[in-house]
Amino acid sequence: MKRRDALKNIGLSLGYAAVAPSALSILQSCTSEAEKWVPQFLSIEQGEVVKSLVDLILPKTESSPGALDVNVPEFIDLLAFKSYNEEAQSKFLEEINAIVSELIKGKPAEFQIKDLKTEDYDALLASYLKTKPEDRKDYNTNQKLIFKGLNGLRSRAVWAFKNSEVVGEEILAYNPVPGNQKGCMDVNEATKGKGWSLQY
């Protein structure tokens, strides 16, 4: 099963039961061009890592946009900058720094983040997010931090992707003015298998 299909079946069911209006306003304000993006909370290098990871988690396909098309990295950066308290910001940075350190571990001293290849990011995601819970029992403190960071990044990316205007109106089932409610109706009949855009 391809990553995009897996997200449609599993990942897009993730999300928050309630969404703060301020978070949605941050999401809709993320309209910068990806090539010119300058993070407000993260460093340039940290932003590059986040950008590369979410691009692999939610890649663009022929039929749907990817995370970069709907400014997911910008949203994650702005969310941390505008919504997190100092403790949450500190924990988020600690997780991102652990991920960065793992990516450049064993590289020469002159190695830079921009020199990382897609394979480096893909290997990191596979080694942590494809593991079984029992395999994570023996993780050391740093490995637990990396897993928590990658898992949290994936959750934020999927949530931001789902709630972006483009995905909400063009990919998911969308009805801005709902009509009558039809209970016990098969989802394939109701929306051709798509989840609803407006869930809150």
Image (cartoon, helix red, strand yellow):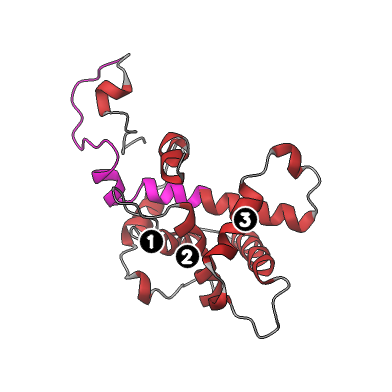
**In the image, residue 55 lies at what x, y percent?**
45, 59
Image: magenta residue range: 155-183
Whether residue 161 is in magenta: the answer is yes
The residue that mark 3 highlights is 149
Whichever of labels 2 and 1 marks the residue nearer the N terminus, that label is 2
Whether residue 150 is in magenta: the answer is no
The residue that mark 1 highlights is 68
Kindly report the distance in space between the C-alpha atoms of the residues bearing marks 2 and 3. Answer: 14 Å
The residue that mark 2 highlights is 51
Of residues 39 and 185, which is closer to you in this image?
185
Q: Residues within 10 Å of mark 1 (few under 14, many from 20)?
A: many
In which image quadrant can residue 198 be found?
top left
Whichever of labels 2 and 3 marks the residue nearer the N terminus, that label is 2
Report the residue at 61% width, 64% height from top. 96
Asked whether the residues under the numbered discs 3 and 1 touch, taking CB atoms below 8 Å apart as contact, a structural biologist would say no
**In the image, residue 3 lies at what x, y percent?**
46, 45
Of residues 73 and 60, which is closer to you in this image?
60
Asked whether the residues under the numbered discs 2 and 1 touch, taking CB atoms below 8 Å apart as contact, a structural biologist would say yes
Report the side of 175 relative to 142 (left or right).
Answer: left
Kindly report the distance in space between the C-alpha atoms of the residues bearing marks 2 and 1. Answer: 7 Å
